Amino acid sequence: MAAVELEWIPETLYNTAISAVVDNYIRSRRDIRSLPENIQFDVYYKLYQQGRLCQLGSEFCELEVFAKVLRALDKRHLLHHCFQALMDHGVKVASVLAYSFSRRCSYIAESDAAVKEKAIQVGFVLGGFLSDAGWYSDAEKVFLSCLQLCTLHDEMLHWFRAVECCVRLLHVRNGNCKYHLGEETFKLAQTYMDKLSKHGQQANKAALYGELCALLFAKSHYDEAYKWCIEAMREITAGLPVKVVVDVLRQASKACVVKREFKKAEQLIKHAVYLARDHFGSKHPKYSDTLLDYGFYLLNVDNICQSVAIYQAALDIRQSVFGGKNIHVATAHEDLAYSSYVHQYSSGKFDNALFHAERAIGIITHILPEDHLLLASSKRVKALILEEIAIDCHNKETEQRLLQEAHDLHLSSLQLAKKAFGEFNVQTAKHYGNLGRLYQSMRKFKEAEEMHIKAIQIKEQLLGQEDYEVALSVGHLASLYNYDMNQYENAEKLYLRSIAIGKKLFGEGYSGLEYDYRGLIKLYNSVGNYEKVFEYHNVLSNWNRLRDRQYSVTDALEDVNTSPQSTEEVVQSFLISQNVEGRSC
């Protein structure tokens, strides 16, 4: 018992001492700043716990103080709590710190290289924290100031620093949907890479290529994204930071998903999840990043129930780390909203999906301008949900109101997508397809047909004739022809095409086949082909039996508790498969 007390008493004495310092904060303020960073942070955290945010804000808004607190690496998740609380309270600590750092960089422009190097290192840590916390514009300002310092010395060390700075800058510009500036950043990084190469030096390109892959993926340039993910994988070597390895694996997995290379995607994302949890822990934001991409994979291979569970786990982590009105929390809400919408599509119970969609929009509009591209996808998700609620509504006035709200959201999303990506883009095509479905619900059938055909044409040209996205739009046009326009021959051809693509990509138990099968049963009933009605009733029964067996036991999180391969083996397996495919082509 005595031993237990000896372990317990010092912790209590320490907390008592921290509380005493906080109680005398006004008198002790200057002395607090001379404490070691871990103890200094504990004093500030106690201020946060006591709700003394004005005093905490006055401390954190001083660059020297915050830079020192950032050195307490084991307190980082607690620092995020404090920081987010200040932002929610209206203390613009992110922009104050970014401005202070930018001014400092301008002051030291004429100083020697060592002073600039120290400032760059501070900027990398500060900008990294702001980036991790989701304050991309402020992080961008910090990294631009670092880059400016790098350009003042035309020597090798600063070329390396400039490359690192460009990678960080590209990441925050991707996160903030500044894709045109991101492309310029990548080109700038390449110029510094070329300088280094001419002097016999090489900087590892894995992180840079991974960020380029993310940029191209966001712009729906899937072939290019896939090409650069291969290049990023080739750059993974022993000694790379685990964070870089995890991020490259994540991006490569997503690129594989949209190319329908599901086996490769599975191997990559499962190892990324395992690696992130093993290295960072199960409460770390980086682990939640991998879970979101794991959820994306599961949703795309039709394991919808498990994707909902994974997205919920990711949201729980982000809420526990960031809380409040944070962009990372908003994106997790949006992903969960969409997967919940897909999961509950047949049941018609959309309350949970709507809640998360509205939370995402509420957070984004609180933080970002009303015309920010991030709003396009969250508005789209809410519109899809509202349309389904309207269809099931028995009150005509409420139905019309919900459909009109969905229409306004879809149009807003379409305009944002066209402004960012142009007409000839997969994202724009998706919005056309969504409008087509909505116009069908609004009984505007000609407008619906026009939107579906436009969506199909764009998707076919960009993705090919047999892509999943093409199948979705083809199935929706078939439904329009079947249920509302009595074009049964056209509808039959489109249903059969949609079914063929679905089976080829996902197998006989694919969830989307249900709607095509039911559509064909209705179609054959309408034209009096009862032999076909009987045939597709049997097909639908077999499909139901397959669905009952699929994914009934697998726990997606349990599935990534261990990794049967090392990182090197995962990378080599991926690259070998690429070489084999290259030779076969």
Image (cartoon, helix red, strand yellow):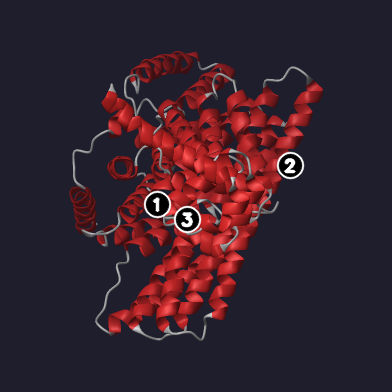
Tell me where residue 253 appears, x and y as whole percent: 35, 47
Three-letter residue code for mark 1: Leu
- Can you tell which mark lies on residue 69? 3
User: Does residue 445 lie above or below 550 as drawn?
Assistant: below
Seen from the viewer's position, the closer of residues 123 and 519 is 123
User: Which residue is more in the foreground, 189 or 460?
Assistant: 189
Cα gap from disc 1 to disc 2, whole angstroms: 46 Å
Left or right of residue 74, residue 108 in this image: right
Question: Residue 502's x, y, as percent?
Answer: 41, 34
Q: Quadrant of the N terminus?
A: top left
Q: Nearer the viewer, residue 386 or 101?
A: 101
Circle number at residue 408: 2
Query: Which-is-in-front pick, marks 2 and 3?
Result: 3
Q: How far apart are marks 3 and 1 (CA)?
A: 8 Å
Rate crowding at label 1 as few (under 14), some (14 to 19) or many (20 or more) other CA atoms within 10 Å. Answer: few
Please tell me whether mark 1 or mark 2 is closer to you in this view. Answer: 1
Identify which amino acid the numbered label 2 is placed on.
Asp
At 27% across and 33% down in the image, what residue appears?
Answer: 561
Location of mark 1 (residue) = 73
Question: Contact (CB < 8 A) between labels 3 and 1?
Answer: no
Q: Residues within 10 Å of mark 3 (few under 14, many from 20)?
A: many
> Observer-nearest residue: 527 or 412?
412
